[in-house]
Amino acid sequence: MTIREVSARAALLAAAVVFGLAGPAVLGAIFGLAAIVNVGELLSRLHTGHDLAGRILFAGVGVLALLLVLGVVLNELPGQLSHTNWTVGWGVLATVVLTATWRLGGAPRPGYRRPPAAALVACGLLALGTVAGLIVAWQGVSRERSTQVLALSAPWHDQRTARVVVQSVGVSGVYQLEVWPDGDQARSVPAGEISLAGHRSPALTRQVRLPGASTHWAIVLSHAGPRRPRAREVILWK
Amino acid sequence: MSITASSVKVSAEARPRAIARPAWLTGVWTVGLAAGIGVVLQAYVGYRGRVAGAPPALLFWLSLGLIYVAGVVTIVWLPLTRGLRVLGIALVSIAMQLTRIVLYPDMFVYHDELVHDRVLKDILVHHHLFTANSTLPVTPHYPGLEVVTSGLVQLTGLSTHTCGSLVLLTTRLVLALGIFLIVERMTSSDRIAAAASLIYIANPQYLFFNSQFSYQTIALPLCVGYVYMIVALSSVRRSIAWPALGVVAIAVAVSHHLTSMGLVVLLLAWLAVSTVSGRRPRYLVSATLLALFCVAGWAVIAGPTLFPYFSEILRHNVKSVQQLISGHSDHKFFKDTAGDRTPVWERYASLASVLLLVALLPWALWTAVRRAWGARQAAALVLCAVTVAYPIIPLGHLTEATSEVADRSSGFIFIGVAFVLAWWVFAHLRPGRLGRLPAIAVLLGSLVLFVGGTIVGSGPPWLRAPGPFLVSSENRSVDPIAVSASRWLGDYQRPDQRIYGDRINALLAALLGNQHPLTSLADGIDNDAASRLLLAPLSPLDYQTVRTDRLNLLVVDTRITQDLPHVGVYTDTGEYGTVNRTRPPDPQAVTKFDHVRGAERLYDNGAIRIYALRRIG
C-alpha cells in the first residue's frame, strides 16, 4: 500500500470515529458503513488466491467475526458496550488492521478488474427489484398499521383519582367517559367527553375523580349518544 | 489429504458446447432480472396478505420458483465464466433473503426472532451482555448475532431491524460463497460448485428458519467460512493464520451451541480421516484444537443455562418417540393442531422431494465415496458421512418434537447432500450435450427439490406470509392489536414485572413491553397451574399460583377463545388441557378476573386485556 492510500484510509477511519461520536446522524451512518467496508476490504487481502469470491468471503467472515469478538472484549471494559466504546473500539481495531496490512505489505491482487457489463446489469436489476419490493411492502405495512385500535387504560390511580389514557388508531367520533362505582349498573358518574380524530392520534390522558365510598370502580369508555354502548372498560380496586 | 487436490476429471476448463437457446437467455443478467421480479412479487404477496387478508399462495411459489429456476438454468446450464457463475449464486442467495425482508419489512415476527430481538434490545439498553432472558434463557449466552447487530447499530446509527437485515444478508452471502468455494476446491469444477450451492438452497430450513434473526443464522455461515479458511490460509504464515482462525473460532463458539459443537465434530472427523489418508491440510490440527478449546470453554460459561435447555429438548423428544412407539402419538401429517391442512399439491411436492433424494442419494453417495476414497480426499469422505444422516430429516417428521430437531439439522446435513448430489449429477451430465427430455427432467427435478424441500421445512402454509390474525401462530399472531397492548406495557408500566400470557403476547410483552414473562425453564413455574389462569375456570389454585409465582400482570388475549392453537399450545409445553383438546377455552374462563376481588383490569383494547393481580386473594 502506498502512503497515500494508507493516509486516505486512516482519514476515513478518523472521520467515522469523529462523526460517530459527535457528528450528524447521516454522516455518522455513511462513514460508519464506509469504515466497516474498508476493514472488510483490508481483511480480504488475507486471501492468497486470485479470485474475488474468496476475498469477499474473507471480508464477510472477517467483519462479522471481528465485530463479534470486539463486542465480547468491550463487554469486559469499563463502559462496556456503550456507543462511545463501540466507536472508539472499532476505530482502534480498524487502525490495527490497517497498520498490520500496511506492514505486511498486503496489496490488492488481480480480481479488482472492472466487472463485465452483464454483472453490473444483473446487480442493478436486483437492486431495482429490491427498491420496488420495499415500496410495495411498506404500502402493505402502512395499510395494516391503520387497523382500528381503541384502547382504554388506567396506568395509575389512588383512592380519589385515576389517570386514564385513551389510545386510538383509525377511530373517530365522540366518546363518553363514565365511572361506575361498586359494579352498580344503575348509576354512573360522567367523567368527560373524548373526541377522536380518526387517524393515529396521540394518547389522550384524563384525570378522573373516583367516588370515595366505593370499594371498586369500573371506568367505561362509551360511544356518545342515547344508548351509549360500552366500548372499553377498566376495573380498579381501592 | 488436502481438499484442494482432486483427481476428478471435471474441470472448469471443460466447458460444454453451447446449447441452442434463446439469445436473451445467455447472460447472468437474466438471474438479476428474475431475482428482481421475484422480490417484487414476494412483496406483493405480503401486501395482499396484509390488505386483502389472503396471501396468494400460487404467486408465492411462482416468485420463489422463478428465482430458483432462473438460477439453475443460467448458472449451471449456460457456459458462463467462473466469475459470473459466482455472481449468479450470490444474486440468488441474496434474493432469497430479500424475499424474507419484503414480507416483514418493519419488524421481526417469528417466535425465535422475538426472543433474539429482546436480547439485542437488552444489549443496546443496558450496554452489556448476558442480561437474563426468561423466554429462552440460553440465548443471552450465545449472543453472536446480537453483538454484531448491536455493533452495527452503534457504528451507523441505523435501526435495529435495518442492521439485523444487513447482517442476515451478509451471512447469506458468506454461506453461499463458502459452500461454492469448498465444493469447488474438492471437485475443481465451478459448475459443480454452483450446482451444489443451488441444491443447498433446497434444504428444508434455508428459506424459513435459517433466514430468521436467530443465532444459528450467523453460526452456520461462520462455520462454513472457518472450514474454508483452514484450506485457504495454508500458504499464509502461522503468525497470520493462527490469529485469523482464532478470531473466527471464538465467533463461532459465541454464536450458537449446537452449530459450534457440530463444527468441532466435523473437524475431528476431518482430522481423523486426513491423518489416516496421510494428506492433512497445514492448519487443520491447530484449527481443530482452537475450535475445540473455544467451543468447550464457552459451553462451560453458558453451562448453567445450556444443560437445562438441552435436557428439556431431549426429554421432549424422548417422550414424543415413546408416544409414537406406544401408538399414543397425536401427531398428524400435513395438518396443524388447529386443523388447518396443507394443500394436497404441497403434500405431494414435499413427498416427491423426499422420494427423489431417497432414490438418488444412494447412487450419488456410492459414487462419491468411491471417488473420494480413490483420490484420498478426506474432506469429501467426511461430507459423504454427513450425507448418510439425511434420513434423519424425513424420519424426524414422525413426531412433532423430533421434526423440529430434524429440520434444524438439515442446515448441516444438506452441505453433504448438496456436494454429493451435485458431484454425481454434473460429473455425469454435460448440460450442453443433453437432449431436451433429460434437460427438462433435471430442471423439473431441481424445482421439485426446492419447492418440496421448502414445504417440508416451512411448516403450515399460514407460517409463510402475512395475513389475518390466527390464534397462537407465530407471525400471524403479531398484529397491530397485540403490538399496541405490548407497547402500552412499555410506555406505562415499570419494567421487568413478572407477567404471564399466551405464547406470542408474552414474547411481545418482553420485547416491546420490557416485562419479564414467566416460564418453566427460567422461573421454574408449573405451567399447568399457570396456564389455568388463562384457560380454565376460576379455582382456588389460581390464587395460590398468583402468590407462588409472585405474578404481577396477566395478559389475556380474548381471541384465544375463537380457535384451537395453531402451534399446539396457547402458552408453552405442559399447559392445562393439552391432551385431547377439541375446543378452545371458554370465554368466561378467559375473562374470569373481571369478577375477582382485587384483580384490576388496567388495559382493554377490545381483544386484549391486561390485569394487575398483585392484590388478589
Image (cartoon, coloured by chain):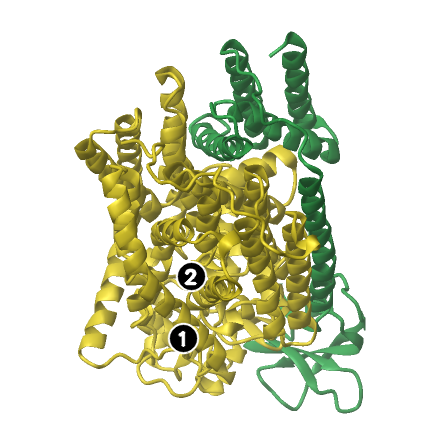
Chain colours: A green, B yellow
As drawn, is A4 to the left or to the right of B79?
Answer: right
- Pick the residue in front: B518 or B385: B385
Type of amino acid at the residue the image marks with label 1 = Leu
Amino acid tagged 2: Pro
Number of disc labels: 2
Q: Residue B526: percent from the left, percent from the top?
A: 30, 67
Between residues B301 and A96, which one lies in front from this camera angle?
A96
Marks 1 and 2, how far apart at CA: 37 Å
Q: Secondary structure at mark 2?
A: loop
Name the residue that disc number 1 marks. B533
Considering depth in this image, is B361 or B128 the residue closer to the camera? B361
The structure residue drawn at horizontal position 51% and vertical position 28%, both measured from the top left corner, is A79
Q: How many residues crowd around disc 2 within 10 Å: few (fewer than 14), some, or many (20 or more)? A: many
Quadrant in which residue A227 is drawn: bottom right
Q: In this view of the protein, which residue sits in the foreground, B612 or B510?
A: B510
Looking at the image, residue B76 sits to the left or right of residue A35; the answer is left
Residue on which the image places disc 2: B204
The structure residue drawn at horizontal position 67% and vertical position 48%, both measured from the top left corner, is B29
Of mark 1 and mark 2, the one earlier in the sequence is 2
**Disc marking residue A168:** none
- Residue A208 appearing in the image: yes
Asked if marks 1 and 2 fall on the same chain, the answer is yes
Camera-near label (1 vs 2) is: 2
Quadrant of image for the C terminus of chain B: bottom left
